[in-house]
Image (cartoon, rainbow, N blue to C red):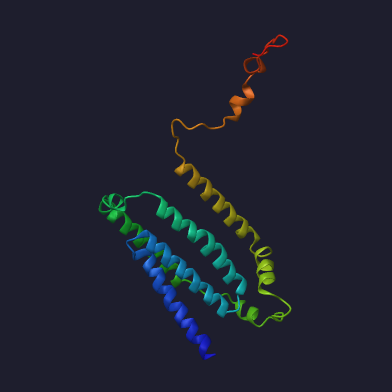
Amino acid sequence: MAIATLCFYVFAAILVACGAMVITARNPVHSVLFLILAFFNAAGLFVLIGAEFLAMILVVVYVGAVAVLFLFVVMMLDINFRDMRKGAKRYAGVGAAIGIVLLAEILLVVGTWQLDPGLSGAGAAPTPAIADMHNTRALGNLIYTEYVYLFQGAGMVLLVAMMGAIVLTLRQREGVKRQRIADQVARSSKDEVRKVNVSSGSGI
């Protein structure tokens, strides 16, 4: 028990420190590396509470795909961050106002937060043994029954975000050949097929 408590404090402290370094590091590559380290520590916290499936998904999906993708994008894009920060002072007032509004909303939510009266009875409800119900199956039953609409809504939000990212980053470059299906379908065989009469024993 003492080892688990020590591991919790170590993982939690490193996770909080990495989260702070993600937003305070000047180099974006360092921010992504701190983000990867934060994911690993979050996975360790999931293992401590017995959610091995969530820990594996966090490492495989977020560390192995998303964070590495962020790292490659940041390293491959030739972005001058000094030029991007030149006009930041002009929007400092607007950013501070938006931050104050968000802080007020968070305080209102936290200040008016109350426990559900039926929550105490839910904790005493009989739960199946760990050997009979794996956390993967329990998570699937919860997501696809009580939170199925929220799960589908989150998928739609991610789809719209992906389409928006593609539209925002799409650049039309001159001199690049692209397939235009409408032009191919609209072509006539008379314009594309040429009939040539070749006499016997001779070429074209």
In the rendered image, the vertical position of residue 148 relative to residue 10, given as above or below: above
Image quarter of the C terminus? top right
Residue 29 in the image: x percent, y percent?
A: 39, 60
Residue 71 in the image: x percent, y percent?
A: 44, 58
Residue 38 in the image: x percent, y percent?
A: 46, 70
Outermost residue, bottom side: 2
Task: Identify which residue, 99 or 15, lies in the foreground.
Answer: 15
- For residue 37, what is the image quadrant? bottom left
Residue 186 in the image: x percent, y percent?
A: 62, 22
Task: Identify which residue, 92 or 159, lies in the foreground.
Answer: 159
Residue drawn at point x = 64 percent, y = 25 percent: 185
In the rendered image, the vertical position of residue 54 relative to residue 175, given as above or below: below
For the image, the number of numbered tags is 0
- For residue 126, what is the image quadrant? bottom right
Image quarter of the N terminus? bottom right
Does residue 114 appear to the left or right of 14 in the view shown?
A: right
Residue drawn at point x = 69 percent, y = 70 percent: 137
| Residue 115 seen in render | no
Residue drawn at point x = 50 percent, y = 71 percent: 40
| Residue 156 seen in render | yes
Outermost residue, front side: 201
In the rendered image, the vertical position of residue 96 relative to residue 159, given as above or below: below
